[in-house]
Amino acid sequence: MTHPKVSTQRLANGLTVVAEHMPDVQSAAMTVLQPTGSVYDPAGKSGTAALYSEMISRGAGDYSTRELSAALDNLGVQRSVSPGLSHTTLSAATTADRISDAIPLFGAMLTAPHLDDEQFAPAQDLVRQALHALEDEPQQRLGRYLRRCSFDAPWGNPSGGTLDDIDSITCEDVREHFATHARPQDTIIGVAGNIGASQVFESINAVFGSWQGGGGTEITGSPRAASPLHIDHESAQTHIGLAWTAIPYSHERYFDAWAAVSILSGGMSSRLFTNVREKKGLCYSISASLNTLKNEARVFGYAGTTNERAQETLEATIAEIRSLHEGLTDDELRRCKAQAKSSLIMQQESTMARSSSLARDTWHLGRVLMPDDIRSRIDSITIDDVRDYAIEYAPQEIVLVTIGPKPLSSDCLHVDAVTA
Amino acid sequence: MQFYRHQLANGLNIVAELTPSVHSVAAGFFVRTGSRDETAEVSGVSHFLEHMAFKGNEKYSADDVNRIFDEVGARYNASTGEDVTTYYAAVLPEYLPTTMEMLSVLMQPSLRQDDFDMEKNVILEEIGMYDDMPSFTAYDNVMATHFSGHPLGQSILGTNESITALTAEQMRSYHRQQYNAANITLAIAGNTTIDAVRELAEQFCGSIPSGDAHRQLPAVEPEVRSEFIVKDGSGHQHVMQMGMAPMASDPLRFAAELLAVIVGDDSGSRMFWDIVYPGHADSAELGYNEYDGAGTWMTYLSCHPDQAAGNLQRMQDIFDVVNREGVTDDELEQARNKVASRIVLRGERPMGRLSSLGGNWLYRGEYCSVSDDLEVVRNIGRQNIRSLLEQYPLNVSTTVGVGPLETV
């Protein structure tokens, strides 16, 4: 297997570029994290970042909206722009021979968007419609409520905005958001594909090298919402969301947490799938996954179940969560290591996955984890490591959010602390 | 890269595309069976059977099947459609033999009564899950309405009633009839060798019973119909429409793909500029779907109910102009570039090649490499679009709404 080559460069203005040369592929992909995320939405204006990410393709630099769109389509660039918590993420991929030509276009969007008054109302209408559609999608709504109850605001606020606030936001707010927060320091660009690092650095430098941005601001937090929380909805299923504390990606024991969650929910032989779905037939959709911010993390769990069985599903799921530290076997650990090994190697086929990892690793860790390093770290995990983690980080307090015709009894959430 | 084609003594077809420079290998069984092959009495059996395939045979229990796939780090799944059921896995090359063994176990499951009774609950849960997704309700209903009286209109999931009434014996009978070697194509893409493919196929697929591939292909004769399903408590409107388009064997299908991109792609298309970009809807798209013996134009609209009528009119206006005048050279060039890029990027990974490999063989008995596909796209011109529109204009006969509106 070719060992990937990763190079990092920090431009004079503070922008960080990470490049990985992948000679066996034809494509190249780019992930840009710009620190213009929704945690910077002013109070009462949740949706500012969402509007910003919608508007940056509506005219930028020397290009009108249509010119940008046609130019990117003609370069075969698949792309998306989405608001996140700390960052706006711009993702793009095309054949490696054309990615350099796309960089000036993205440079315009990220450093010189027009943010014109006349584009504001249509953008606001579009975002409002998307938010309105969400009201009829209980599974999607659940995620938003779960975050609100798990993380303090603004990290618990939805990065896509809210219907309540969307009409309080003005174009000036969006311009202010850009002027203050779009800056090269804390902007990270990851490029992976059949393109050499020096070419990447040259192209990025030419476009972003002289960019000076805003000064940023501090964030004031406020407490998360209370739970258990129930939202009434006449749905066929009751949608159950659960959350409890875990450790972030930057923590030295992160991979022990990862293994524990993998044993709980990592594949079809995992505990939740086997014991709640296969053996009891209580649900079709059930899962748990790690969700990490820079300094804290949660495990988010989900189960969708017909209303009559919802209480039973909740109790069965909680029982699995609480007994994770029990009966851990070498086979379970071996399986999650096999899945990790597969993922790491197959990731080498995907320029999009690699470019995203380059950018996100840099944000969370200040460096890139090489696949071989991850593999040896995972190979070194023992059953004791996983058991110790599962005991130390056993859920003391579980957040419960439900959407459906009736609330559920939350008595099963409260049990004695786990003893070794 | 090499193409390899073989047929076993029992009639099972094998198509493989070998690429030594990639890191993984993907394998899948494409079974020519789906909701269109069911009778009303066993509605949903193909999909339920897809679940039951994972419950093992005489040698392996359900737990064993899931465990072994996870032990080899497989990315695996299955899906049931109107005319094909697919089972697939991507693994590191050293695990291909185990993966082939397990995939072949899926082809000849025991279908035990107690597994059947328990999994029935999971199917009912899945039906419930889709009931809470308005766009799926719209899809099911627009298919049922457009293809009313035609096998393609049959529901993939079935209903609570049909699934509850279904017996294990009915499923076993359906399985015997449909899962014979003539109906099954094995597709393999990625880092393996011709010898490995042949040996593994002989070893693991040789015992699949031979049989006949048979399927009725009645003509489609949709009437102009409109149906609005009022969902209590819903606030947002979804509308799907359907019209006739080239079938899977029709050479016009490439032009149809391109036209759908020009007219109704989720960005940069006519529908995007006229409807989504000004904020009249959060989603307005046109897609092209191919089936055995039929094809459809399918539109999807998601918007505030107040905007629905206006948006449907905008869509109709766009279709009228395109039917009359065709498309511009610039639009065509842009769409070619978009589609070519998609073909290349998807084709980089073995899993990305698998559905093309299996689909091309199943529907058309052909093989197309990435280069072949790119060549076809490059050569589509305004003439092709004109021929397409003459035979299959952008006309919709069927409209289904899901949301608060009773009519539009």
Image (cartoon, helix red, strand yellow):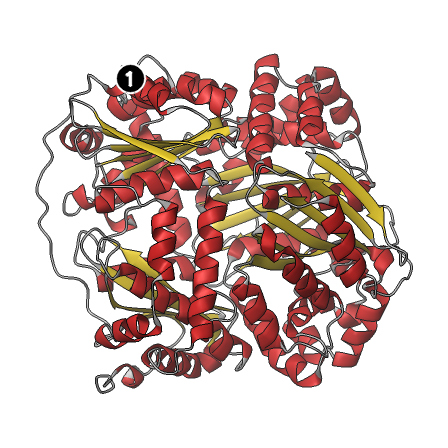
Position in image of residue A324 (x %, y %): 35, 77
The vertical placement of B275 against B72, above or below, is: above
User: At x 83% / y 66%, what residue is drawn?
Assistant: B207
The residue closer to the viewer here, B296 or B200, is B200
The vertical placement of A205 against A234, above or below, is: above
User: At x 47% / y 81%, what residue is drawn?
Assistant: A309
Quarter residue A146 falls in: bottom left
Can residue B393 be spotted in the picture?
yes
Which chain is indicated by disc 1? A
The vertical placement of A264 against A154, above or below, is: below
Q: In the visual, does B314 lie left or right of B243?
A: left
Which amino acid, mark 1? Val
Position in image of residue A366 (x %, y %): 21, 42
Q: In the visual, does A317 lie left or right of B178?
A: left
Callout 1: SS: helix
Query: Are there few (<14), some (14-19), or many (20+) residues within 10 Å of tag 1?
Result: some
The residue closer to the viewer here, B343 or B80, is B343
Q: In the visual, does B160 lie left or right of B230?
A: right
User: At x 74% / y 16%, what residue is drawn?
Assistant: B383
User: At x 19% / y 69%, what residue is drawn?
Assistant: A226
State the residue position of label 1: A207
Position in image of residue B98 (x %, y %): 64, 62
Position in image of residue B154 (x %, y %): 74, 59
The residue closer to the viewer here, B252 or B187, is B187
